[in-house]
Amino acid sequence: MRARVRRPVQDGWTTRRWLVVGTCAALTVLLALALAGGWVFARSSRLTDNLADSDTPALVAAAQLEDTLISQETGVRGYGITGQRSFLQPYTDGLADQREHTAVLRRLLAHDKGANADLDAMLARTEVWQSRIARPIAAAAPGAPVALAAQRAEEGKHEFDAVRAAAGRLERTLAERHDKARADLRRVDAERDWIFGFIAAVITALTALIFVGLRRGVTGPLGRLSRDVRTVADGDFGHRVAATGPADVRALAVDVESMRVRLVETLAFSDTVRDRLDEQATDLRRSNAELEQFAYVASHDLQEPLRKVASFCQLLQRRYADQLDDRAGQYIEFAVDGANRMQTLINDLLAFSRVGRVHADSTAVDLETLYTRTTDSLSLAVEESGAELTHDPLPVVSGDATQLGMLLQNLLSNAVKFRAPDRPPRIHLSVAPDGEERWEFAVTDNGIGIAPEFAERVFVIFQRLHTRDAYPGNGIGLALCKKIVDFHGGDVRIDADHSPGTRIVFTLPRRAEQPAPQPAAETQPAAETQAGPEARSVRASLPAPEPQPESEPEPDGDKDAGTSGAGL
């Protein structure tokens, strides 16, 4: 009973599932890391932008505003002492710069309430100083020192110190804001470095995990499976294919193992069948040898008693004709005719058995020459029937000359024999290419024809469509033709559409070589060569025929009928 490898249920994860889950997990981790990296990068960019576009410019603008106020105080104080208008230029320019720097600070500190409060306090103290000291002194007439400057010198110093104090508080506030922004930026930069380093480490780990996973889960099992398959393919059919790895790879290995087991079983069965075939071939060779021995005996030793029966029956008829009545003479004629027909059947069977066995050499055969020899041998029957034989130019084919001669002789003699009683036979042998490797021949006549329902039956041995009284023969002619054509690798058939008469079509292999040698007739020594020593011993053990009387002539039944070339 054939062993079967049971395929396991795929209860584990397949390669596809591992790849899908692993890819999704890796993409999830990478997405999270990308979001974290994007967040820290955006935060770092925002802090950098605030520091570069807000905190640093605000600190610079506050310092410039303080310098502008100092320039105003210097210009007012110089004008109060000298009374010269040129000293008021710093004060006049400082007022314009004050408005510009104040506008810049207002824009930069729009969202910082503490810095805005310090800026408002400084501007308030500046307004007190300007209204009490700067503007009254600047409005005095030039040319002489301004008395108001000397009168309010102490107040002016006090008010401007308050302005400086307010400006200092604003600068400290902005400096603290600047320092805090820089600290935040440094911290975020550190966090960014850590996150990007972690991302690099995770990517490296994922790469290593993917490599190890693919190696252990896919390439490793597939490599082992490939090695096992190559081992089996190299001839070690007993090597078992191991199933490892993911579920689908294991299933594949199980299928390969099942195929290996079935291959081993098939090879074992093939070896058994080959052994049986060898035994049958030996038996067949032994049987063929026995058949050859039987054919030899049938062609020679078995014909001796038949010839003896026919001979002595004829002697009996001639010597005692005056003592026998008509009924006895008729009985003797029946016995002679039966012996002659039995001898003819034996010769026909011998010729049928020799096809492909005695003459089996394949050479170049010139059908033109072979046709001429065949028609010469049939010249007497052709002349008596008034037949007209024509043919196309015949080619050179590959085959056995003796067998092909028998083929033409049987086909042409059949066409002459089965002629219509009301018209002379007209027989034509045509030939045409059938592909690149064969010739198609056709023997066409105008005889009695063959009914379509008998188109296959006529090629069976001893199948007759007419009685022996109507047409002589043993019904072996077309069977012999079919066997010869089959031996040469062709086919033969009856053209059922042809009418009147019969058209027999057959094919033979092409041979574009020199003309074939002359066909050799089958001789008696060839049969003796085929027969072994056992056949010769059988022949020797048979009783020898009695000597014929010298005064009596040899009867007609003693002639060898030869190969029957006519008759369906």
Image (cartoon, helix red, strand yellow):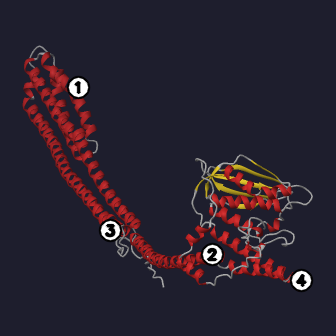
Q: Which residue is mark 2?
A: 295
* Residue at x 35%, y 59% (from the top left corner): 27
Disc with the residue nearer the chain's start (2 vs 1): 1
Callout 1 environment at 10 Å: few (<14), some (14 to 19), or many (20+)?
few
Secondary element under disc 3, as helix, strand or loop, is helix
- For residue 116, above or below residue 195: above
Across and down, in percent, residue 47 comes to 24, 46
Name the residue tied to disc 3.
224
Label whose residue precedes the other's in the sequence (4 or 1)? 1
Between residues 328 and 301, which one lies in front from this camera angle?
328
Going by the picture, which residue comes out furthest to the front?
Answer: 551
Of the residues shown, which amino acid type is indicated by label 2?
Ala
Direction from residue 185 to residue 320 in the image, left or right: right
Residue identified by numbered label 1: 96
Calculate the distance from the C-alpha at mark 1 to the C-alpha at mark 3: 88 Å
Q: Earlier in the sequence, mark 1 or mark 3?
A: 1
Give the Cα distance between marks 2 and 1: 144 Å
Vertical relation: 287 (above or below) 73 = below
Name the kind of residue labelled 4 in the image: Asp
Q: Secondary structure at mark 1?
A: helix
- Mark 3 or mark 2, which is nearer to you? 2
How many residues crowd around disc 3 within 10 Å: few (fewer than 14), some, or many (20 or more)? some
Q: Amino acid at mark 1?
A: Ala
**Residue 112 visible in the current orientation:** no
Residue 86 appears in the figure: yes
Residue assigned mark 4: 322
SS at badge 4: helix
In x, y percent, where is residue 2? 47, 82
Q: Is residue 533 left or right of residue 137?
A: right
CB atoms at circles 2 and 1 under 8 Å apart? no
